[in-house]
Structures are given as C-alpha cells and as structure tokens.
Amino acid sequence: MKGAKNLRMLVTNDDGIYAMGLWTLVAALQQVGEVVVVAPDREQSAVGTSVTLHHPLRAREIEPLVRGIRSYCVEGTPADCVILALGNLLNSRIDLVFCGINDGSNLGDDVLISGTVGAALQGYLKGIPSVALSVGALKDVHFDAAARLAAVLARNFEKQALPKEILLNINLPNLPLDRIKGIEVTRLGRRSYSDEIQPGHDGKRDYYWIVRGKPDWQPEEGTDIWAFTRDKISITPIHSDLTSQKALSAIQDLPQALLKGLT
Ligand code: MN
C-alpha cells in the first residue's frame, strides 16, 4: 500500500552514501512517504557526534541508487549531514530522521562513539523524532528485517502513536525476520572493549592503530545487550542528558571541600 506521501523523512548513515544498508532502508521508507538522502561521501563509522567547524563543507547531488530519491553526499560527518540537511539543503519540513541501516550493532556504551547515533542525535536536538538503526553484523548482513521494521515504525510516527521528543536506538540481530524471537524495549547495557595499540613506522614517523578487541558484554536483564544476545530486536529510547543521578548525590559535599582547599 502506498502512503499518502505526506510524511517527509531524512535518511543518513555513517557507512557512506553507497552503503547497501542505507538504500535498503530508503526503498522500504519510500513506501510510507517522501524520502530524501543526505549522507557522508565516505565511511564515517565511530565518529560519534563530531561536527565540522574548522573547514568548509561541500555537498553535491548524486544519482540515487533508488530511483526518484533526491540525494546529496557531503564531505563531512553524519552529524554534519543532518545539520546541513535541516539547515540549508532541503528547505522543507522533515518529520522523521532515520540513520542506518548500520553494518554492526551499536549497543550499550557504543552509543557514545557511534556515528549512527551521533547523526540521529542531531535530529533529536532539533526537535524531530529520530531513529538510529543497526544490524549486528559486518558481513552477510540481513538488512531486510530492519528495513521492514523502519517502515512500520514510520507509519506509527505518522499516526502520531509515539511522542515527538524521542530518539530511538534500535539494534537487530543478524537474522531473517522469521528467526527473530521478539522485540524488547530496553535500557542501555554496559559493553567495553579491550583496546589494543598496534604501533608501526611509515618510513618517516611512528604511527599507532587503535584496534578494538573483543567486547566485554554484560548481558544484564532488561538491557539492549540482553535482548540482542537473545536474538531479539532491542529498542532503547535515549536522550542527551548525560548527568549521572547516582554521582550527583554522591558529590553534594564536593563544592564545600573544594572551597576549603582553595582558601
Ligand atoms: Mn557504521
């Protein structure tokens, strides 16, 4: 069923504008409403919320991989793409921002460096409901379930069944739809990596690679990692308030101690 074409959606990603996940998403969302693409011209994974302020941004319209979709690639970060799209390139209302479909999960602490979440965050900060979509694999990725889920989700936004002030971080296991075991609303879990530094020398100077080791999963019940490791889709509503409520009460006496030390 074709939509009434009144829902206007911006699609971006952090894997670069020619990534298959982005166009699979575009093809599905096109059934629900109008889609425009503004995405980085190259791989920008793990750039997080980074915004380019110290050199100019260039954008150019490209031939879309799905017919009839107005598409721009930007020499910038995923967050740059959303800021540029909403502030200048599109000149029209956007009702929903989708970022993905990302190759690889963005679970738990990953959201802090995720370019996928970083782009969606910009939509959210501008008051537009935004969704970060990831599938947990880097090879042989099943984008299908995520694309269909996005379309159904968009219809729910269209019916105003969801709050406007929302940023959803969605992760799917890398499975066909009929093998996914359910959908859970979750909170962020804990996942850290053992970062390994691999040094080298390029003939002129020393260099270093940060190599991410195996993640240390903490699949505590109710978390995104817990759902994901049970072959379920995880939906986590996140926001930009990083205040630690726990530490906030624990450091109530700190100002007094500091003042004492300063005088
Ligand atoms: Mn990515």
Image (tube, helix red, strand yellow):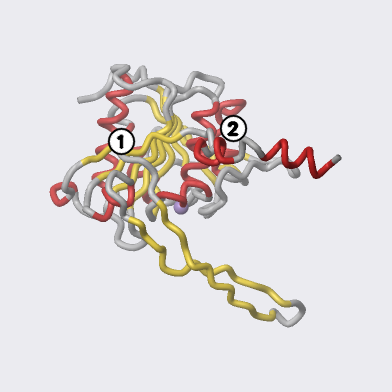
Direction from residue 19 to residue 210 in the image, left or right: right
Q: Position of residue 182 (x, y in %)?
A: 18, 43
Tell me residue 161's x, y (percent): 29, 19
Q: 10 Å neighbourhood of mark 2: few (<14), some, or many (≥20)?
A: some
Of 217 and 142, the residue lying toward us: 217
Q: Is residue 200 above or below residue 25?
A: below
| 245 displayed left or right of 263 | left
- Quadrant where the image shows the C terminus: top right
Q: Residue furthest right?
A: 263
When the figure is inspected, residue 107 is found, relative to residue 1, above or below; the finding is below
Which residue: 60% across, 39% down?
80
Q: Is residue 60 visible?
A: no
Q: Secondary structure at mark 1?
A: helix
The single residue placed furthest to the left in the displayed view is: 178
Count of numbered tags: 2
Question: Nearer the N terminus, badge 1 or badge 2?
Answer: 2
Residue 85 falls in image quadrant: top right
Residue 105 in the image: state x and y as whole percent.
38, 53
Residue placed under numbered mark 1 in the picture: 150
Depth check, front residue: 180 or 229: 229
Residue 102 in sight from this viewpoint: yes
In the image shown, does 229 or 60 lie closer to the viewer? Answer: 229
Q: Looking at numbered disc 2 in the image, what kind of residue is underneath it?
A: Ile
Residue 185, image x, y percentages: 28, 37
Find numbered disc 2 in the image and state the secondary structure of the residue it sits on. helix
The label number, if any, that marks residue 83 in the structure image: 2
